[in-house]
Image (tube, helix red, strand yellow):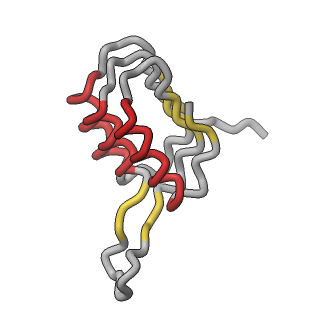
Amino acid sequence: CNTITPVVSRNVLAVGDVGAVRLAKALSFNTNLLHLNLAGNEIGAEGALAIAKSLYSPAASSTSKREKYQSNTALKSLNLSNNLVSDEGANAFANALRHNSSLAVLN
């Protein structure tokens, strides 16, 4: 049985922060894309923060003081190597990974 693995690869297209923010909005609703390669796309802190946030979002029905999160469970690997993610972006991804157990590979 053949299977198709949904993959998007956009190496070195200069997506930048504006493109990353737009892509992050789409990722928030993602149910099919498994692998995303955005290596070398001039993504900075703003784009990294938006993408990290798209990996989890506070659940709308949180009733406790401790926020509950709903994770994007489709994406399995994300490559952001050779971008300008910054310490702030890296911290945002660390926080996202605390709430998202399906993302297995983050470069």
Seen as rendered, the residue at the extreme bottom is 63
Seen as rendered, the residue at the extreme left is 18
Quadrant where the N terminus sits is top right
Write down the quadrant of residue 20 in the picture: top left
User: Which x, y percent locates residue 100?
Assistant: 53, 57
User: Which x, y percent locates residue 33?
Assistant: 50, 41
Determine the residue positioned at 40% across, 21% down. Answer: 83
Q: Nearer the viewer, residue 85 or 24?
A: 85
Seen as rendered, the residue at the extreme front is 87
Seen as rendered, the residue at the extreme top is 12
Q: Count how many numbered circles sit on residues in the image.
A: 0
Determine the residue positioned at 53% across, 51% down. Answer: 74
User: Which x, y percent locates residue 53?
Assistant: 35, 51
Determine the residue positioned at 56% across, 37% down. Answer: 106
Determine the residue positioned at 45% across, 45% down. Answer: 93
Whether 46 is drawn above or below 53: the answer is: above
Quadrant where the C terminus sits is top right
5 relative position to 75: left or right: right
32 relative position to 46: left or right: right
User: Which x, y percent locates residue 30?
Assistant: 42, 49
Q: Nearer the viewer, residue 55 or 33?
A: 55
Q: Nearer the viewer, residue 47 or 25?
A: 47
Whether 75 is drawn above or below 58: the answer is: above
